[in-house]
């Protein structure tokens, strides 16, 4: 792996004993609707007896007064199911999971942006940091793969066997050297070819950062938001041609151990696939993960943890993985 200077390192494997790698509001709980108490209709009072035409003996006791039977109204009604974020469009179980994930990250180092999408219903839940610009780390490699395959299919470039091996290395083990080689070869004379294409894949907030490398823009020094990663993974699932999509998804489902965290935490029953990104940047470590979960890749999840100097690789990895577990474990 490559260790970068200027308070930042981007890498995918350990070098000299240093593990570095690349890439990479909550809604207010709604008050339950008031539920009317169950009313039970009361019984009408009995009419007093009609006096007999035959005089009663003077010694007979007077008739007892009639009583009215009163029904007791229900003192309580069943409480509605607890659905803390109804505007998200997700079922109540997911809503409770989102609330649990939000409560969890509130006590974790740094800030965590989260976006969850149901591709079948169109429901989306995003938390209060989903729009934060954060170092992409190696998550941007997924956008590079999309662009390279698109340009090759269009005939704008011709990928060699070596190029394709490097693309696989970027997806499988987040190889930084492969990313740099492909960026140099296909980035154009001014290095902007990739960045010009990235907004078309949903990364509309992506911003390359100056002052960290001789080459500008450079894949390793860019920022985006969790919303950008959400749009990127959904572009992959919805718009990439079938053969290329199958290749990308197969690689995301079979990543090397150094990427088996984050979205991977949804558990094997969810058949997750992800592209992770991790690096020590100016301002501290970032730990990011984006991918898909569930039958037919129904759900997507984007997480960006900016530790802001409050923790490191281990804390960030644990945070991202636990978020995925809280939201998806046991659903499949």
Image (spheres, rainbow, N blue to C red):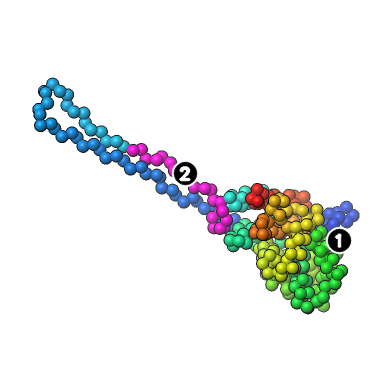
Q: Is residue 231 magenta?
A: no
- Would you call the spot at circle 2 few (<14 residues within 10 Å), some (14-19), or many (20 or more)? few
Q: Earlier in the sequence, mark 2 or mark 1?
A: 1
Q: Nearer the viewer, mark 2 or mark 1?
A: 2
Task: Where is residue 105? Give x, y as percent.
Answer: 66, 51
Q: Residue 213, image x and y in percent?
A: 82, 68
Q: Position of residue 205 (x, y in %)?
A: 68, 68
Q: In this rendering, does residue 191 appear at all? A: no
| 2 and 1 marks in contact (CB < 8 Å) | no
Magenta highlight on residue 79: yes
As displayed, is residue 187 above or below residue 303?
below
Query: Which residue lies under the disc numbered 2?
Result: 78
Q: Percent position (x, y) of residue 287?
A: 74, 56
Quadrant for residue 183, please give it. Answer: bottom right
- Prevailing secondary structure class for the magenta stretch in the rendered image: loop
In the current view of this chain or complex, which residue is farthest to the top?
59
The residue lying at 21 percent from left, 31 percent from top is 65
Which segment is the magenta one?
71-92
Closer to the camera, 285 or 295?
Answer: 295
Q: Residue at x 9, y 27 (%)?
A: 55
SS class of the residue under badge 1? loop
- Indicate left or right for 39 with 110 as reference: left
Q: Is residue 93 left or right of residue 197?
A: left
State the image quarter where residue 74 is shown: top left
Residues packed near mark 1 inside 10 Å, few (<14), some (14 to 19) or many (20 plus)? many
Q: Residue at x 65, y 48 (%)?
A: 330
Q: How many marks?
A: 2
Q: Which residue is mark 1?
A: 2
Q: Look at the image and tell me in which quarter the N terminus lies.
A: bottom right
Q: Residue furthest right?
A: 16
User: How far apart are the alpha carbons under marks 2 and 1?
Assistant: 60 Å
């Amino acid at each position: 792996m490559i260790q970068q200077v200027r308070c930042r390192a981007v890498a995918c494997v350990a070098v000299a004993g240093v593990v570095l790698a690349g890439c990479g509001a909550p809604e207010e709980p709604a008050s339950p609707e008031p539920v009317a108490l169950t009313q039970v209709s009361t019984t009408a009072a009995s009419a007093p007896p009609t006096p007999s035409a035959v005089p009663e003996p003077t010694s007979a006791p007077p008739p007892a007064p009639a009583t009215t039977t009163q029904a007791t109204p229900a003192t309580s009604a069943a409480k509605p199911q607890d659905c803390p974020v109804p505007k998200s469009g997700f079922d109540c179980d997911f809503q409770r999971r989102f609330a649990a994930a939000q409560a969890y990250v509130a006590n974790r180092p740094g800030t965590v942006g989260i976006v969850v999408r149901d591709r079948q219903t169109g429901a989306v839940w995003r938390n209060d940091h989903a729009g934060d610009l954060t170092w992409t780390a190696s998550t941007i490699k997924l956008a590079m793969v999309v662009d390279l395959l698109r340009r090759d299919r269009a005939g704008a470039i011709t990928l060699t066997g070596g190029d394709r091996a490097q693309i696989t290395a970027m997806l499988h083990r987040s190889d930084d050297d492969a990313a740099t080689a492909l960026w140099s070869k296909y980035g154009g004379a001014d290095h902007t070819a990739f960045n010009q294409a990235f907004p078309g894949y949903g990364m509309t907030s992506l911003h390359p950062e100056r002052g960290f490398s001789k080459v500008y823009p450079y894949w390793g020094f860019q920022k985006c938001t969790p919303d950008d990663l959400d749009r990127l993974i959904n572009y992959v699932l919805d718009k990439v041609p079938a053969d290329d999509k199958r290749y990308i998804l197969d690689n995301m489902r079979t990543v090397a151990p150094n990427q088996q965290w984050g979205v991977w935490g949804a558990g094997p029953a969810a058949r997750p696939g992800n592209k992770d990104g991790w690096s020590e940047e100016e301002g501290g470590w970032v730990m990011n993960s984006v991918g898909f979960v569930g039958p037919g890749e129904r759900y997507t999840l984007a997480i960006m943890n900016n530790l802001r100097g409050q923790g490191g690789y281990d804390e960030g990895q644990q945070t991202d993985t636990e978020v995925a577990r809280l939201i998806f474990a046991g659903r499949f």
